[in-house]
Image (cartoon, rainbow, N blue to C red):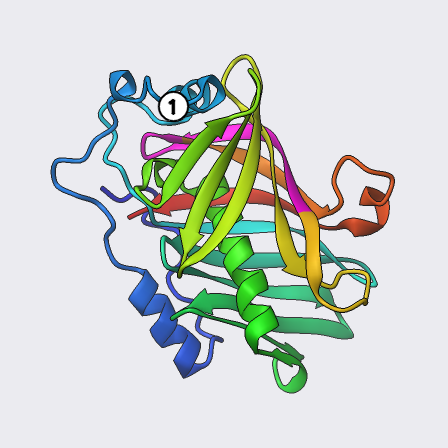
Amino acid sequence: MHSNPNVSSCPAFLPGTAQRSWAALDRSTESADATFDPDSIGMLPAPVIRWLRHTIAPGTPLSAGVQVSMHGEIRIKKWLPFTAQQIVSPTGYIWAAEAGRFPMNFRGYDRYSDDTGHMSWKLFGRIPLVNATGADIDRSAAGRLASEVIGLTPAGALSPDVTWAAIDDHHAMATIIIDEQSHQVTIDVDDDGKLRSASLPRWAKPDKEPFQLHTFGVICDGEFSTGGYTLSRHFSAGWWPGTPKWEQGEFFRATLDEARFF
C-alpha cells in the first residue's frame, strides 16, 4: 500500500552514490498478510498500546518504510529556511535538503545506510562545506535512525528488533538494535495516545567537545493522517531537551507536508 504518490521521488541533486543508496532503501517493507490488529498488542506497555492504537488504523498494512516531504528552519549559526525530502527504512535514511537564502544557499544530505553514516553539504550546491564520515559519524547517524524508526514509522515499533519496557503511564523505552548497536528511545505519550516527544542518548559533539553521549530529543505537536497512519505534523529537535540548555541545543523545526508509506 502506498499513500500520497505525489511525494517527490529521489531528489535530482543527490550524487550518484546517494541516489543508489536511496533506491536501495526505497523497497517495499510490507508483508502480504501483515496488517495492524489492535487486539494483538496487549503485551506491550500501556503508553505504547495507547500510542499505536491511536496512530495506526485497524487493518492497515504494516509498513516500516516512509518517504516524507517537509519544510521548516534549521539553525546553522542562525535560523535558516529549508525544504527537504527524507526516506526512512529499517536499515537507513537519507535526509536531502536545500537551506538558506540568497546569497547563502546550502544543498546536501545526511545519510545512514550500509552500516555507515555520511554528511555532505555544499554552498550553492558546488562549493564543499562539510564532508563528514568515520566511526563517530556512523554511530551518531545510527542513533538518529533509531529515533526516526519510532517517530516516522510507527509500524517499526512492532519490529522484532525492538523491545519495550514500561517506565510509567506516559513513558516507555524502546531498545532498538541497528547493525548490532543498541539504542534506547524513550517516548512520552499523552492520555489520548498522541506522541508528545521522543528522546535518546546519542553519540555526538554538539558542544564542540570530543564525541560522547548527549540526550537528543524531538518534541511533537499537531497531527495528520495518511495511508492508515497518524503522524505528528510539527517537530522541534535538538540537544538536552527539558533542560536550560535546550535553548542553545535546539537546531531543527519542521512541518511534515506529505508522506508515502511503502
Residue at 62 percent across and 86 percent down: it is: 126
Residue at 39 percent across and 52 percent down: it is: 7
- Does residue 174 sit above or below 64 in this rendering? above
Percent across and percent down for residue 41 are 31, 22
Q: Is residue 56 visible?
A: yes
Percent across and percent down for residue 255 are 59, 42
| Left or right for 12, reference 123 | left
Residue 102 vs residue 187, the one in the foreground: 187
Quarter of the picture holding the N terminus: top left
| Left or right for 123, reference 103 | left
- Circle 1 crowding by C-alpha within 10 Å: few under 14, some 14–19, many from 20: some
Q: Secondary structure at mark 1?
A: loop
Looking at this view, name the residue that lies furthest to the bottom.
127
Q: Amino acid at mark 1?
A: Leu
Q: Which residues are magenta?
A: 216-229
Q: Is residue 108 visible?
A: no
| Left or right for 35, reference 255 | left
Residue 5 vs residue 195, the one in the foreground: 195
Q: Is residue 224 magenta?
A: yes
| Left or right for 95, reference 55 | right
- Does residue 182 sit above or below 38 in this rendering? below
**Residue bearing the label numbered 1:** 44
Residue at 45 percent across and 17 percent down: it is: 46
The total number of labels drawn is 1
